[in-house]
Image (cartoon, rainbow, N blue to C red):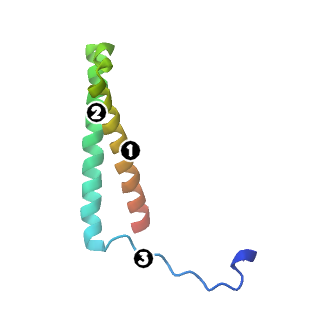
Amino acid sequence: MPPALIGQPPREPRPRACPSGQEAIIKAYLLTTTILFGLLAIMHALRVVSEGAHVGHDPWFLLITLAAAGLCVWSAVLLRRLSRSGT
């Protein structure tokens, strides 16, 4: 044992983040948001390719594209974390 843990009581396992009945609902929600925001970001990227770079100069277009990509990544990370903790 590392010296810092000698004499300390063993840790109790962390409780699960959510009951198993709700976990399936949360996973479905996270999977849906990952797919939808990913598709939105991909469609925006394809629009830039098909219509040219001038579309990318619109600040709202850029904001929505970056927000969709960010939310896609965030929900994918949360989904992966939930899947790992649920084993």
Query: What residue is drawn where x is 69% and y is 78%?
Result: 5
Q: Is residue 59 visible?
A: yes
Q: Is residue 80 above or below residue 56?
A: below
Q: Is residue 87 visible?
A: no
Instruction: Name, please, the residue furthest toward the right.
Output: 3
For the residue carrying disc 1, how many other residues have a C-alpha within 10 Å: few (<14), some (14-19), or many (20+)?
A: some
Between marks 2 and 1 in the image, the one whose residue lies nearer the viewer: 2
The secondary structure type at the circle numbered 3 is loop
Say if 38 sits above or below 4 in the image.
above
Q: Which mark is residue 73?
A: 1
- Tag of residue 15: 3
Q: Which residue is mark 2?
A: 64
Mark pair 2, 1: CA separation: 14 Å
Asked if residue 57 lies left or right of residue 1, the reply is: left
Q: Amino acid at mark 1?
A: Val
Label of residue 81 in the image: none
Quadrant in which the C terminus appears: bottom left
Residue 2 is situated, as x and y percent measured from the top left of the image, at: 73, 74
User: CA–CA distance between discs 3 and 2?
Assistant: 37 Å
Residue at position x 62%, y 86% in the image: 9
Question: In the rendered structure, are the residues bearing label 2 and label 1 in contact, judged by CB atoms less than 8 Å apart?
Answer: no
The residue at the far front in this view is 59
Above or below residue 70? Residue 15 is: below
Mark 2 packing: few (<14 Cα in 10 Å), some, or many (20+)? Answer: some
Q: Secondary structure at mark 2?
A: helix
Task: Please name the residue shown 27% across and 61% down the image.
Answer: 26
Residue 53 to residue 30: above or below: above
Name the amino acid type tagged 3.
Pro
Q: Position of residue 39 (x, y in %)?
A: 26, 36
